[in-house]
Image (cartoon, helix red, strand yellow):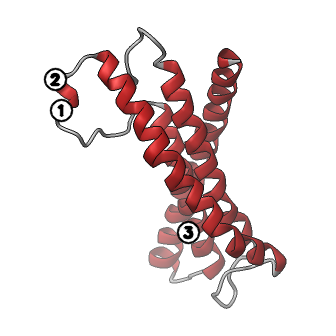
Amino acid sequence: MRGLFLNIAALLDRITRAACMVAVLLLVAAVLTIVVLRYGFGVGYIGLQDFANYAFAILLALSVPVCLAQGGHVRVEVISERMGPSYLRIADAVALVLFLIPAFGLLIWAYWPELRYAWQIREASIETGGLPGLYLVKTTLPIAAGLTIVQGIAAVLRAGPGEGASS
């Protein structure tokens, strides 16, 4: 069961990394196009600016679980650098149960009514001439929170007995 969960977490990480790569490529292309159009031709498009904002929001939200899965999180405690692998394993497990799961679970729970409403009204950009589909972008926040929980559990499982932590 542990192996299956870790395989699923690895697959989700690869998919999330791919989504981040697509988002960053779209963001760069959109910003470059905006700059060329605005300063080269004196033309601006609100829809294109919204597209860049949407790509950035998706990249930002999905970067959190990717960072955690790749061991890019930062340890705030000063004691951990002097402690052994068993301490780090226990500290990771405690942090997962006391902080990561409750915080990201609360994010999903508290954000759900707003997300449901955004889907009901098919929320779009507030800008005149802006893009539709803001509700789709807003959906990435609870997805990213769920993926962060999965990657946190996977990090603790990877650092099983006798293997050291994933910092």
Marks 2 & 1, CB-CB < 8 Å contact: yes
The quarter of the picture where residue 129 lies is bottom right
At a point 52% along the width and 39% down the height, the residue shown is 66
Residue designated by label 2: 82
The amino acid pointed to by label 2 is Arg
Residue designated by label 1: 79
Residue 149 to residue 41: above or below = above
The amino acid pointed to by label 3 is Asn
Q: CA distance from mark 3 to mark 1?
A: 40 Å
Residue lying farthest to the bottom in this orientation: 128
Marks 2 & 3, CB-CB < 8 Å contact: no
Give the foreground label among 2 and 3.
2
- Please state the horizontal and vertical placement of residue 3, each as a whole percent of the image: 66, 15
At a point 59% along the width and 54% down the height, the residue shown is 105
Q: CA distance from mark 2 to mark 3?
A: 43 Å
Helix, strand, or loop for circle 1?
A: loop
At a point 67% along the width and 64% down the height, the residue shown is 137
Q: Residues within 10 Å of mark 3 (few under 14, many from 20)?
A: some
Q: Residues within 10 Å of mark 2 (few under 14, many from 20)?
A: few
Q: Is residue 21 in view from this perspective?
A: no
Q: Quadrant of the N terminus?
A: top right
Residue designated by label 3: 53
Residue 132 to residue 100: above or below = below
Helix, strand, or loop for circle 2?
A: helix
Which residue is more in the foreground, 159 or 161? 161
Which residue is more in the foreground, 125 or 91? 91
The quarter of the picture where residue 107 lies is bottom right
